[in-house]
Amino acid sequence: MPTASTRVPQQERSRATQARLLEATVDCLVEHGWSGTTTTVVAARAGVSRGAQLHHYPTRTALVTAAVVHLTERRAAELRAEADALPAGPRRLDRVVDLLAAAFTGPLFVAALELWVAARTDAELRAALLPLEARVGREMHRLTVELLGVDERRPGVREAVQATLDLLRGLGVANLLSDDSARRATLLHAWKRQLATLLTPADAPPGSTPADRPPGSERR
Amino acid sequence: MPTASTRVPQQERSRATQARLLEATVDCLVEHGWSGTTTTVVAARAGVSRGAQLHHYPTRTALVTAAVVHLTERRAAELRAEADALPAGPRRLDRVVDLLAAAFTGPLFVAALELWVAARTDAELRAALLPLEARVGREMHRLTVELLGVDERRPGVREAVQATLDLLRGLGVANLLSDDSARRATLLHAWKRQLATLLTPADAPPGSTPADRPPGSERR
């Protein structure tokens, strides 16, 4: 029987091992795609024994779904921290859109897209990802509402937030094979103006945008 | 030496064989994904001999890039015909967006996405698709401008058309694993109103939209 003092470091070691495996999974998906992301390759990349990998994540599906959950949560926390550091003021909305656009062109988006496309023709992966898709979608939406500091009960706000996320997903795909950043910057410049108009209540003073207010001030 | 009368049917047979191979390629990509789309599987599905397949498309990359070009051209022609059949009037813009949305959730989009994602980690496929990506992107943009009957020289029009296509690409990805049509319909309803505003010249009579005019009337 392990004593309390040995159990705690062991739990910490387990968590560290899991984190290494999940990070290695995303790295593998980005570098080699779904077909090149086997549990063996991931274990080797993470520097974790095959036995330990099988203990924590017995299947490839278990490994990749855990990786999406873990990395989505980590990325959401990073986005919140980055957004908290943004100054209030008229450029806040622009900076929030830039942060989200960076997420949709980053490694986690690429890794998730590899899985989503593979799941289309892989029944086991599809069954595992479907509930995750709904959850990640809801969390991304809630996070965006929070970062923009808008009130979804106002007409049109929900659709404007959704359109922003769908647009950013489309821009993420457009960036897969070639650097689309110049076109994206021009397009997002126009989108930010539109979004500011869509999110600004009709009775707000001219020139003010929702993101001028501190984040969370309109949270439900 | 073949005579003129035998040459013509042979050319026709070649074209028919090519078309069968290219349609079978897209069907295979939709059904089995990139990894399941081998030249052998495609030849069998098309009912074409292995020799004939190798004669027309010697490599898997040659086959799938030809399929994207062929199907994109065919789909563009179908979209033009469908749009020509639309009545002029205030609902025209809405119907054009619906036609485009159907294209971005249809088999050709799914097949292309399989290839784009595979090309990220396959150097040969990537080299073949990169010039194609630019060309398909330009043609899709030109087609959308034409169907909407708008003048790209007017400020904001180019960005509005691009945002529409990027949004539709994002919606296509959101529809990969589950039927997203209800959410998409609500979102597009709002987007159509926004697009009508963005595309309507400031000096136009109230309530008129660019798509009220017959298609091509503003073509350069």
Image (cartoon, coloured by chain):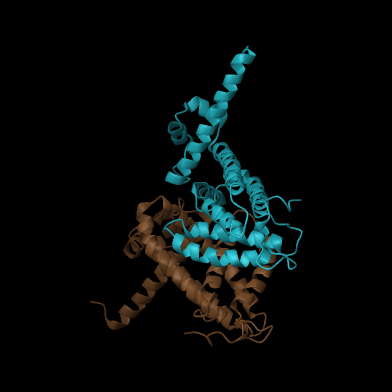
Chain colours: A cyan, B brown
Q: Report x, y in % for residue A86.
A: 59, 50
Question: Looking at the rendering, which quadrant does residue A36 occupy?
Answer: top left
Q: Is residue A83 above or below residue A160?
A: above
Instruction: Using residue A2 as the reference point, say whether residue B54 is left or right of it.
Output: left
Which residue is located at x 56 percent, y 32 percent? Answer: A57
Question: Looking at the rendering, which quadrant does residue A162 occupy?
Answer: bottom right
Instruction: Using residue A180 as the reference point, say whether residue B89 is left or right of it.
Output: right
Question: Looking at the rendering, which quadrant does residue A92 occupy?
Answer: bottom right
Q: Nearer the viewer, residue A4 or A115?
A: A4
The quarter of the image holding the N terminus of chain A is: top right
Circle count: 0
Which residue is located at x 65 percent, y 75 percent? Answer: B94
Q: Is residue B78 visible?
A: no
Q: Nearer the viewer, residue A65 or A86?
A: A86
Q: Nearer the viewer, residue A200 or A62?
A: A200
Q: Is residue B189 visible?
A: yes
Q: Nearer the viewer, residue B101 or A77?
A: A77
Q: Report x, y in % for residue A191.
A: 58, 65
Q: Report x, y in % for residue B51.
A: 33, 60
Which residue is located at x 68 percent, y 59 percent? Answer: A210
Q: Is residue B148 above or below residue A193?
A: below
